[in-house]
Every structure is written in C-alpha cells, then in structure tokens.
Amino acid sequence: MSHNNSHNNQTQFALLKQLLYHQHYQNMIKFIEDNPSWKSQKLLKLLQLGHAYIHTDLKTIEELSEQVEMNYLTRPSLLERRVYSYIQGLAVKLEIKEYDDYLRAITPLLVDVLRLTLENTVFPDLDRYLVEVMKETEKGTPIYRGLQWNQSLIEADKNGKISKTWERYYGKHFNYSHYVSSSHLLKLVQDYVKDPKILKLAAQMRHIEKYARNIVAHELVYVDDEWLKHRLTIDAKEVHQQIINMVNAAGLRDPQQWKGLTDIQAAIEKELENNHTKMSK
C-alpha cells in the first residue's frame, strides 16, 4: 500500500471511529456505501442493528440479532425489550445534551415501566384489561391509534381493583375514550403496590413528567441543567439515574440486556478494526 493510501485509510478509520462513538450509524452506512473498501455484510448488519436498537425498532432487532450472534437481545418479553432498548437510546440523547427531546421521550417510557411494575407486583394479567385501538383515516385506511382500557371487562367486575380505583379518582365517569396514560397507571400503583421504594420512585417520575416534560412537549423552550435544577432541583444525569432506578424496580435488572448497546458498539468497532487491518496489508 502506498503512503498516500495508508494515510487516507488511517484518516477514514479515525472518522468512522468518531462517528461510531456518537452512534451515528446511518452516517457510517452512507460513508461505507460511498467507500466500498470498508464494506462487509457483517459490518452493515451491525450498523443497521445499532440504528434499530437506539430507535427501538424491535422487528429489525429480531431479524438481525441472530445473524450477528446477539440473539440474547430477543430473550426478554416484548415489553421488556422495548424498555431496555428505549432507555439506552435515551442515554444517547443525554450524552449529546438533547435535553428537550430527552424529556419529550419520557412519557411513553413511563407508561411501559409502570405497566411492567404492575405486571410484576399485583396485576400479572394487566394486558387483559388493555385493548389496541384501530381507527380509519379520512381515506378509510385502518391504522393503530394506541391502547385504551377494556371498558366491558372492567365494568363487568364492579368489585375489581381497577373499577375501585376509577371510582375513587374519577367517580362514575371514567372516560374510556382516553388512551392509557401514566397518570392512570400511577393511580393503580399508588393504590395497590406496597413496596415503598417503588411508590417513591413512581412519584418522582410523575413529578419529572409534570414539571419538566409536559411544558417541553407543548412549548418551544430551551432546556439545560440550570433549567432542570430550577424546576426539579436535579440535573439531567440525576433525572436519568432516577429513570434507571425505576426501571430496575420494575424488574429489569438483567446486566446483559443493560449493555446491549455497548455490545453492539464493541462488535462494530471490532469489525472496523478487522477491515482496517485487511486494507493496510
């Protein structure tokens, strides 16, 4: 290899490693497509897997994980996989200080974590009380719109836990047309979960949602650590640690799953180094 080619190869290697450090998987794919000497099927699959993982694309994760010998990523339940993937994707936003997007993303995570909390404590059959709602667009195309509470099942059990909670907080007029929210789930947690640690963490998460996330979701505001401390008395890293604590309390403690993104990063780096070595010969 000539000196110029060697220098160019080294420069490209450094660029790819920098892109990898920041999880810019799509930019790496584009670069490799434009520079085919770096291309290998395994590397492309790993990059696609990395992108899928930080965006909670469970279908692609399932398709690719076995092909790159990471099928352990599909071992937990669907809901658990969603949370493991989602929170590691959130950490990427935290690292680059995209605090506004980070806060907007908390609510769907909180819904899933509270669902898992209830399933692992007092409602192992919680999914029975949830229904997927399909509605037609103006063109008549049916699309998924979200989860709602199963009105007929809940109302048929007048002395059931959910019925009692709805009556306690909403009287006789719970609105079943509303989609399942963290507020609904938190009320069930407060009424029936006995673990004081879980109750404290759930209340903290709701506090974060109420005083930080909600305004960011509806107004254009600049968010930094000073803004967070003013509204919550904690900074972004402390917010993220509280979320991790809540996820752990919900039963997600598998260390192998918690390092899913780290493993993908390491596999990509190893493949890059192998390709770099081959090109240097």
Image: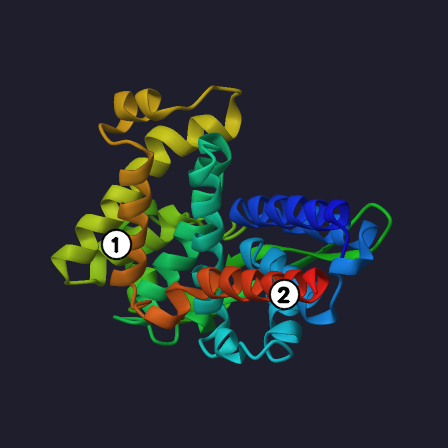
Q: As displayed, is residue 36 above or below residue 66? A: above
Residue depicted at x 44% and y 76%: 76
Q: Position of residue 109 (x, y in %)?
A: 44, 52
Task: Give the distance between the C-alpha atoms of the residues marked 2 and 1, in whole angstroms.
Answer: 29 Å
Q: Position of residue 69 (x, y in %)?
A: 56, 80
Residue depicted at x 26% and y 29%: 232
Residue at the right extreme of this rendering: 139
Instruction: Report the mark closest to the observer, 2 or 1.
Output: 2
Residue 210, quarter of the rendered image:
top left
Tell me the crowding category of disc 2: few under 14, some 14 to 19, or many 20 or more residues within 10 angstroms, Cα based: many
Q: Position of residue 179 (x, y in %)?
A: 52, 51
Q: As displayed, is residue 223 above or below residue 132? A: above
- Which residue is at the front of the view, 114 or 140? 114
Name the residue type under label 2. Leu
174 left or right, relative to 253: right
Looking at the rendered structure, the number of numbered marks drawn on it comes to: 2
Tell me the crowding category of disc 1: few under 14, some 14 to 19, or many 20 or more residues within 10 angstroms, Cα based: some
Residue at the left extreme of this rendering: 196
User: Which SS class for mark 1?
Assistant: helix
Which residue is denoted by mark 2 in the rendering? 46
The C terminus appears in which quarter of the rendering?
bottom right
Q: Which mark is residue 245?
A: 1
Residue 157 seen from this side: no
Name the residue type under label 1. Asn
Residue 262 seen from this side: yes
- Which residue is at the front of the view, 245 or 50? 50
- Which residue is at the front of the view, 136 or 259? 259
